[in-house]
Image: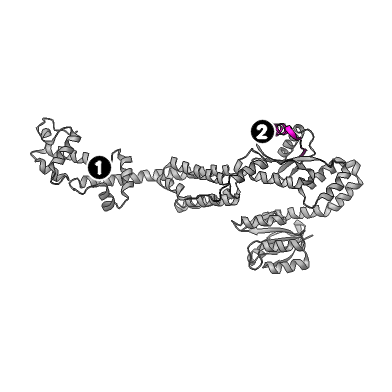
Amino acid sequence: MYKVLLVDDERIILDGISRMVDWTALDTTLIGAVRNGVEAFEFIRETRPDIVVSDIRMPGMDGLALVEAVHEVDPRIRFVLLSGFGEFDYASRAMQYGVRHYLLKPTNEEKISQALRELVDELREEGNRETFVQTMRQELDRVMPHVKEQFLKEFVTNKTYGTRDWNYYRSLFRLDSDYRVRLLLFQLEGEFEFEHLFAIKNIAEELLDKPLLSTTIGDHVLIVMEDPGGDSAELLFERIYRIRETFQTYYKMDATIALSEPDHIVTARSMYKETLQCLNYRFYLGEGSLITRKDTAASQSARRNEFAFDEERLSMPIRSGHREEAAAALTEFFAGLKEAQLDIDVTKSYVIQQYVSLIRLCEPELMESYYRKIPLIVDMTTLQAIQSFLEGVVGELAERFYRHNTVKHGAIVRKVIAVIEEQLGNPELSLNWVAHEMLYMNADYLGKLFKKETGEKFSNYVMKARIQKAMELIALGDVKIFELAERLGFGDNPQYFSQVFKKYAGCTPSEYMKSPDTSAF
């Protein structure tokens, strides 16, 4: 049985995990549950558990400090860290001490059991290592090919091996001491089965002509091959693309590929880390890329110190229902993120901040449904996938506000027209007067809205309405021009009234009165 210690400052969590996990079924036994890091560290020094399940945030000594302290005492002890949303920095710092299991609170029995199961498997594997080496020596001739592959895989991925180990096994396996190699790491895109990893591995073995090592590591396929050197690099790139294209042809799936720089095989572990880091740039460079250190160096040199973020740049056109402008603002937002290429977690935090500012524009019921989608953003592995997701959200919200504003704007313009009809004789009638005194709105916004809905500028609409009314009054009977001017808002300026009348009617009021046809224009 492997010994497990629980650490959390919340008793309800300690009690919950203690009761819900079937410890015996996992080949483990719970030896203690403590409520802070200091107490946990003392307990660990005395009892040496195999696995510690600990909260990150705790008073006194937090989970990260506990990991660091325990690593100095006994680096073989495994950790499962429980974290709240947004604690990416804590998680990344703990990785240097070998912590690979992080569970987001609140968690459940299945996730904890899976993490414990994986750690127990690791502990078993570590315990079997010495036996494995002894067995390898005893049956070397019979299992040489398999052992060689297994050693190379371990040498590339396991930090417990070093130069001394390489020298020993190089002699044992009669390997060339001057090997300069390159590492290829394949990551399949979308959902896949183990058979797909096996397939791309076989394709790579065939097209790369017997690499030193081809194996699967977790969800990746690793290839270690001799560096062709010189002008053969171009041929190597062609073969890598052929591997990807062949796999696409047969399985209709894509793969992202990381290629290390050439170096001596002794540095293979560093080269493996290099390829893993290259795959991280898949977030910005996109799925299906071939990524090298040169790509990551170019990205780093292009980075800016800051990302200019203005959440209103996108929120304003959505509120206004301007769908094209909203789409353009979103494209601009993601172009800035891609150019800045900040830390991935920082980039996601900007995206989430923008997303939250958008969904706050919604009514409460819709807002709640959008809030539940935030974890989807956190789990997305490329910037393009996040952008596609937000494009859908922005499209939905802009369309929703467009329909809402269409009804709202129509009602506003109807109110303006009613005011015009009622106030035709008011010399103060103007866009500013209606906006400020009658509707309490911004005059520029009202003017644009009025023209959009009617096709006329406010001033033109008013003048046409006044001249139309003048014609109607003329048709009703004897009326003086100065009386028309006064009744229709021109005050004591009949001459100006006559000029406006002629502009819109094509003749002066006097000529119109003498005309046999006094119908409206």
Circle 2 residue: 248
Name the amino acid, label 2: Gln
Looking at numbered disc 1 in the image, what kind of residue is underneath it? Answer: Ser
Q: Quadrant of residue 517?
A: top left
Task: Give the numbered dot on residue 169.
Answer: none
Decide whether the magenta segment is chiefly helix, strand or loop. Answer: helix
Q: CA distance from mark 1 to mark 2?
A: 64 Å
Q: Residue furthest left?
A: 478
Under circle 1, the secondary element is helix
SS at mark 2? helix
- Dividing the picture into quadrants, the one containing residue 141 is top right
Pinpoint residue 179: horizontal percent, then vertical percent.
81, 40
Q: Earlier in the sequence, mark 1 or mark 2?
A: 2
Position in image of residue 322 (x %, y %): 41, 42
Answer few, some or many: residues within 10 Å of disc 1's Cα (few below 14, many 20 plus, some between 14 and 19).
few
**Residue at coordinates 78% horizontally, 43% vertically from top-left?**
264
The residues colored magenta run 224-246
* Colour scheme of the rendered structure: one colour
Magenta-span inclusion, residue 482:
no
Q: Which residue lies at the image location 64% right of the left edge and 67% below the top edge?
A: 11
Estimate the x, y position of residue 153 in percent, counting from the top left: 79, 45
Taking depth in this image into account, of 50 and 233 the one nearest to the observer is 233
* Tag of residue 459: 1
In the image shown, does 167 or 53 lie closer to the viewer?
167
